[in-house]
Amino acid sequence: MDMEYAKKTVCVLLCGLLAGCGYQFRVEGPGPTIGGANVAASQESQPRLVIRTLVNNSFEPNLETRYTNYLRHEFSSGSGAQVVPDSKAADLVLTGQILSVTVPTLSFGQTTTLERRAEVVVMVKVEEIRTKQLVWTQTARGASEFYVTSDLQFNRSLQNRAVEQAGRFVAADLAARFLMHLESGGLTKRAAAPPAIPPSDP
């Protein structure tokens, strides 16, 4: 009986200790909620950005739509801005140009080219829709290498993939740079600057 009593006493003490010394988790700020309420709240403070179709000034045809889609995807997920379609009211508008696409040779064999690189240059600018003031401008470069084979048609396919990959690199780079601009207070500083007041007539 003494052993039985001792076991019960130990169990009671352990339960009391566990109940009194339980772990507590605390999170600074609002925690996650089901249903996306916090996402909606955070988007209220994000500038609404519309991205216009890029102008293609390169020799590669039909790049403007793909590169614009890359920009919309990357800016939606990693720029700090809320990308909206043309039909919605936006605070900012992004326009830009594909300045160039080049495919230089990197290495040669005795009789043929072994490796080439697709290099692209894209310039974009962001303006306030209401005031037409320039908010941000950036030129970005992207590159992607590919090996050359004896099949000309397959080489063209490899080149197309490399050009697309370089465009994705450019879009990701521009989105990251715009996020840095926002986090450094680029829009806030501009908004805080009071507009110039013309002198009043005497």
Image (tube, rainbow, N blue to C red):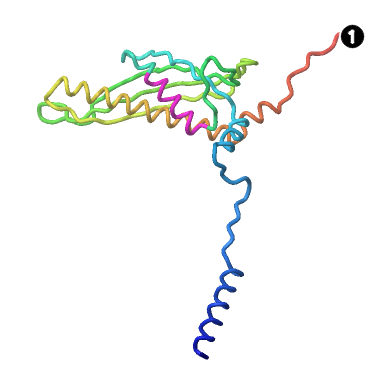
Spot the residue most to the bottom: 2
Q: Position of residue 107 (x, y in %)?
A: 20, 31
Q: Amino acid at mark 1?
A: Pro
For image coordinates 55% across by 23% down, the residue present is 49
For image coordinates 32% across by 25% down, the residue present is 164
Q: Position of residue 32 (x, y in %)?
A: 56, 44
Spot the residue most to the right: 202
For image coordinates 51% across by 83% down, the residue present is 7
The span shown in magenta is 66-79
For image coordinates 42% across by 20% down, the residue present is 68
Q: Give the structural element (helix, strand or loop) at label 1.
A: loop
Rendered image quadrant of residue 158: top left
Rendered image quadrant of residue 19: bottom right
Indicate yes or no whether the magenta region holds residue 68. yes
119 horizontally vs 4: left or right = left
Above/below status of 73 relative to 1: above
Indicate yes or no whether the magenta region holds residue 185. no
Q: Quadrant of the C terminus?
A: top right
Question: How many numbered circles are shown?
Answer: 1
Above/below status of 90 relative to 43: above
Q: Position of residue 145 (x, y in %)?
A: 27, 31
Rendered image quadrant of residue 100: top left
Q: Position of residue 81 (x, y in %)?
A: 54, 29
Magenta-colored segment: predominant secondary structure: helix
Residue designated by label 1: 202
